[in-house]
Amino acid sequence: MTILKSILLYAVLWLPLSTLGQPLTAYAEKNILVFGDSLSAAHGIPREEGWVNLLQQQLQLSHPQYQVVNASISGETTSGGRQRIAAALRKHQPAIVVIELGANDGLRGTPVADIHANLADLIQRSLKAHAKVLLLGIQLPPNYGGRYTANFKAMYPRLAKRYRVALVPFLLEGIAPEQFQADNIHPTAPAQPLILQNVMQHLEPLLDQ
């Protein structure tokens, strides 16, 4: 065997073994797609202080194989999300989709049946793309009418039960009135770790499956 052939053979044998020393995350990275509105887009606060960015920081320590992709847009509705979801799923191929939509629909008085249909479509498309789904529940202020707000609130657990997906019953659970911005809709930066805690209680079981 010539010296050149010996070198080439050594290179072929060595390359696969050399990859064993590289971090596992280089091969096992999985995307978590956060698909929401201003509550997830860090409206009114620095983006790095939003709960989605805090989620990425926490996962870097506890589940480094996951990468968070924040596809949230302030002002987004369920119908707008329905138009965007196919492209987002193709681009990011997420292992988990976190759906946080419906608040803007509710504030506009959109019929609950229409919101339900849009969210159902988002869930079905995500499941069809072989992603696990975490649905984030939203509630409306009582001044929108008792019947409407009750039906809106009940919509999220109904969807979670029908499609057997994980649910955060209320994303803003435990957020005090003084932890909202002047619009009384968007939480302040100090409230973001509390939001993350609400999410992680139901997201973590999906990470470990």
Image (cartoon, rainbow, N blue to C red):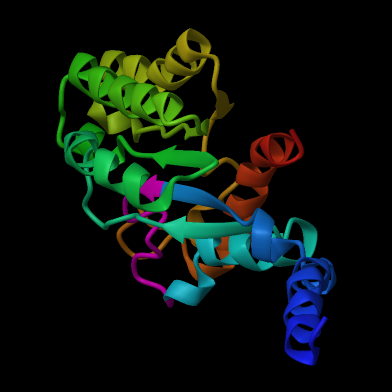
Residue sitting farthest toward the top: 162
Query: 150 or 32: which is nearer to us?
Result: 32
What is the x, y in percent for residue 129? 42, 31
Vertical side of 12 occupied by 192: above or below: above
Residue sitting farthest toward the bottom: 3
Q: Is residue 81 left or right of residue 137?
A: left
Say which residue appears at 41% left-offset and 73% top-offset.
45
Query: 82 or 23: which is nearer to us?
Result: 23
Q: Is residue 40 magenta?
A: yes
Q: Is residue 76 left or right of residue 136?
A: left
Q: Main secondary structure of the magenta part?
A: loop
Q: Is residue 31 magenta?
A: no
Can you say which quadrant of the picture contains the C terminus? top right
Q: Is residue 208 left or right of residue 179?
A: right
Residue range in magenta is 35-46
What is the x, y in percent for residue 165? 54, 22
Say which residue appears at 53% left-offset and 58% top-offset.
68
What is the x, y in percent for residue 65? 69, 57
Q: Looking at the rendering, which quadrant does residue 103 occupy?
A: top left
Q: How many discs appear?
A: 0
Q: Looking at the rendering, which quadrant does residue 169 occupy?
A: top right
Query: 137 or 24: which is nearer to us?
Result: 24
Say which residue appears at 73% left-offset and 35% top-offset.
205
Can you say which quadrant of the picture contains the N terminus? bottom right
Query: 118 or 63: which is nearer to us?
Result: 63
Vertical side of 155 occupied by 22: above or below: below
What is the x, y in percent for residue 207? 70, 42
